[in-house]
Image: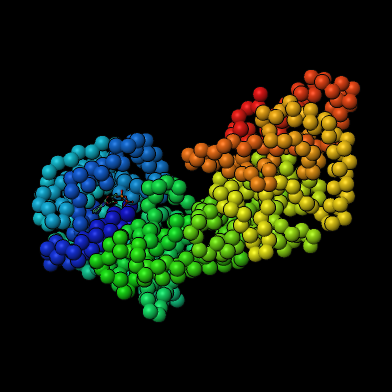
């Protein structure tokens, strides 16, 4: 909780320092700082900053909202969890300020916005409600007074009303905060507790892993360790330092348009802006950290940033470093990479679907997925190519709505029989980037759900073609009869070369969009003519043999039409996604 409050104070000081560049009248000569004061008798801990402060409206919006919106429950959980589980709980919801209710029964906040006169007092006991009133504060800034619960060390609730405790916590968690953090005793402020060294411009060798981790928690407002810390130094015509982190877990808002994303931008250690989206592309939005660009103007605005050439150069370097770090992780640390991929793989793949992404080849190198040979595996395209037989030219894949659904698809039967590995993709984004028919070096990525696929050696293919011709001659009439029965729902009924045990399956024609893609386009609001699938039937299946006999005996036997519908229904059932898009066959 103390780190959260200190981080908030530090942000408020950053904002004030930045505002003062454009509005020098906001500066009052006082040193920007954070103070901590304990009143042991009253059991209060007061955290004060002379930062930007908040208006009454801002207090309601920033501090009040969470108290209103269904947080009663959350706070109850928080209280029950005490200190052991609470960090995870808070990290998950990102309710920094409210973490103080872990240690306090009552919190009062008095704040005055820089450049205004009045102050506002907010108070709550953490029961889901709060009070607001006008107040006074000698100068701009925010003071938060916690009335501490009785210490209960047995349950992890320490006595925070001692200076030594505060000093230990500040040194450990907030050492790099750029403003002095002092303990005030008997009205006198002591020496700063923190060293205030900007961690990103210290040489890598001098910074410990723990220091990186603490800094990550500070910038990312996360309670967990980062998966990776990536210090970056850009030298030459443009000078910049950056310290980037790959988190170990996806934030709950990763797919929300309101996601708090982007890096913090500093100019020569002066904070300029938060959530600077221009520094990394959207598919790397999970990366957290800071960038300190030495040659940028302090007056830089978001509009300027978008066009700034320096920012473009820095961005390029950052992307390069992040991708290189991920590539190293993939090669050297498989377990870490699995964690990374599970959390952020779908986001990274957005880059492959984007029309303006650079580095698509590098992104493709980072893609890993399950395959028919490794159901839970993380097979890369390079792994796949390395073990495919010489006769195989393309990379085969199948997409579907879930891991299970793809793995069970009848479309894989023939590949299984031939021993040919198929990559299995089940993230919604996969359909999008694979639709653009990417190539991995010389190798095309080919969907097994579409068109005809020639498998095996030349000889095997010839044999197969001959067998198919034979079957066609035998079953041609029957196929026409089947088609007549289901022609409203399908484009064609054909003999399949894909199936071994199932009787039927649905595929898209070589040039058609797959059913899933159509559904996604429809969800995005595109009006599309419905493209009917092709029903493929297995000529070797006993049902087809029986039907052929029925058909020979009596071409208009109604059972042929019924069976055609059964074959179609079975094919839909084997493919839940298509079923929901195409509607139920009659
Ligand atoms: P977070 O810091 O993760 O956004 P918090 O609940 O800790 O969430 O704080 C909510 C918001 O309240 C902050 O984003 C900030 O706008 C405002 N705030 C909190 N503490 C201060 C402070 N000391 N000075 C000014 N604004 C603050």
The answer to which quarter of the image holds residue 172 is bottom left
Question: Depth check: 161 or 507 in front?
Answer: 507
Quadrant in which residue 493 is drawn: top right
Residue 37 located left or right of residue 269: left
Q: Nearer the viewer, residue 94 or 321?
A: 321
Residue 228 point in image, percent of width and height: 49, 63
Residue furthest out toward the bottom? 236
Residue in the image at 41% along x and 54% along y = 223
Q: Is residue 381 above or below residue 242?
A: above
| Image location (x, y in percent) of residue 45 | 23, 52
Q: Is residue 270 above or below residue 458?
A: below
Front-lying residue, 301 or 322? 301
The C terminus lies in quadrant? top right
Residue occupying image coordinates x 50% and y 60%: 357
From where the camera sits, is residue 176 visible? no
Q: Which residue is located at x 60 percent, y 66 percent?
A: 332
Is residue 466 positioned above or below 3 on the image? Answer: above
Residue 295: percent from left, percent from top: 31, 74
* Residue 341 shows up from this direction: yes
Seen in the picture, residue 89 relative to 9 is either above or below; the reply is above
Q: Decide which of 530, 372 is in the foreground and name it.
A: 530
In the rendered structure, the answer to whether residue 195 lies left or right of residue 37 reads: right
Q: Residue at x 24, y 57 (%)?
A: 12
Task: Say whether residue 453 is left or right of residue 145.
Answer: right
Query: Percent position (x, y) of residue 47?
Result: 23, 55
Indicate how the structure is coloured in the image: rainbow
């Amino acid at each position: 909780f103390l780190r959260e409050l200190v981080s908030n104070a530090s942000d408020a000081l950053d904002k004030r320092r930045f505002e003062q560049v454009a509005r020098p009248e906001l500066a009052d000569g006082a040193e920007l700082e954070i103070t901590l004061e304990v009143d042991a008798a009253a059991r209060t801990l007061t955290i004060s900053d002379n930062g930007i402060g908040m208006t009454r409206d801002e207090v309601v919006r920033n501090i009040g909202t969470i108290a209103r919106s269904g947080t009663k429950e959350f706070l109850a959980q928080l209280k029950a969890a005490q200190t052991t589980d609470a960090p995870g709980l808070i990290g998950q919801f990102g309710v920094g300020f409210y973490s103080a209710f872990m240690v306090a029964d009552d919190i009062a906040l008095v704040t005055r916005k820089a450049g205004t006169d009045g102050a506002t007092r907010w108070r709550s006991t953490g029961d889901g409600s709060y009070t607001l009133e006008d107040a006074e504060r000698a100068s701009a800034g925010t003071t938060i007074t916690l009335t501490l619960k009785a210490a209960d060390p047995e349950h992890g609730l320490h006595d925070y009303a001692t200076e030594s405790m505060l000093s230990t916590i500040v040194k450990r968690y907030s050492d790099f905060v750029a403003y002095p953090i002092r303990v005030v005793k008997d009205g006198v402020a002591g020496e700063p507790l923190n060293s205030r060294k900007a961690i990103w411009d210290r040489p890598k060798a001098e910074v410990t892993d723990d220091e990186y981790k603490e800094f990550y928690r500070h910038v990312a407002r996360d309670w967990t360790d980062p998966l990776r810390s990536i210090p970056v130094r850009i030298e030459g015509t443009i000078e910049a330092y950056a310290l980037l982190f790959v988190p170990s877990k996806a934030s709950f808002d990763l797919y929300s348009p309101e996601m708090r994303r982007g890096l913090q931008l500093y100019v020569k250690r002066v904070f300029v802006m938060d959530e600077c989206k221009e520094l990394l592309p959207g598919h790397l939005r999970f990366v957290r950290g800071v960038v300190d660009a030495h040659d940028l103007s302090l007056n830089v605005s978001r509009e300027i940033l978008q066009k700034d050439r320096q920012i473009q150069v820095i961005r390029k370097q950052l992307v390069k470093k992040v991708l290189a770090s991920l590539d190293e992780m993939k090669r050297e640390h498989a377990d870490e990479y699995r964690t990374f991929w599970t959390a952020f793989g779908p986001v990274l793949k957005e880059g492959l679907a984007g029309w303006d992404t650079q580095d698509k080849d590098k992104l493709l190198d980072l893609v890993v997925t399950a395959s028919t040979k490794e159901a839970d595996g993380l097979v890369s395209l390079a792994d796949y190519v390395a073990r495919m037989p010489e006769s195989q030219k393309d990379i085969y894949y199948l997409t579907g709505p879930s891991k299970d659904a793809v793995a069970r698809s009848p479309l894989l039967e023939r590949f299984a029989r031939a021993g040919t590995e198929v990559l299995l993709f089940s993230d919604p984004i996969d359909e999008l980037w694979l639709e653009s028919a990417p190539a991995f070096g010389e190798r095309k990525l080919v969907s097994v759900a579409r068109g005809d696929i020639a498998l095996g050696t030349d000889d095997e293919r010839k044999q197969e073609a001959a067998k198919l011709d034979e079957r066609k001659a035998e079953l041609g009439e029957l196929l026409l009869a089947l088609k007549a029965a289901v022609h409203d729902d399908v484009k064609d009924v054909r003999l399949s070369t894909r199936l071994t045990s199932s009787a039927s399956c649905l595929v898209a024609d070589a040039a058609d969009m797959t059913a899933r893609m159509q559904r996604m386009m429809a969800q995005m609001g595109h009006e599309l003519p419905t493209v009917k699938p092709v029903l493929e039937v297995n000529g070797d299946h006993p049902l087809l043999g029986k039907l052929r006999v029925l058909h020979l005996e009596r071409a208009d036997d109604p059972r042929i039409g019924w069976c055609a519908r059964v074959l179609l229904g079975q094919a839909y059932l084997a493919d839940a996604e298509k079923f929901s898009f195409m509607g139920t066959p009659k």
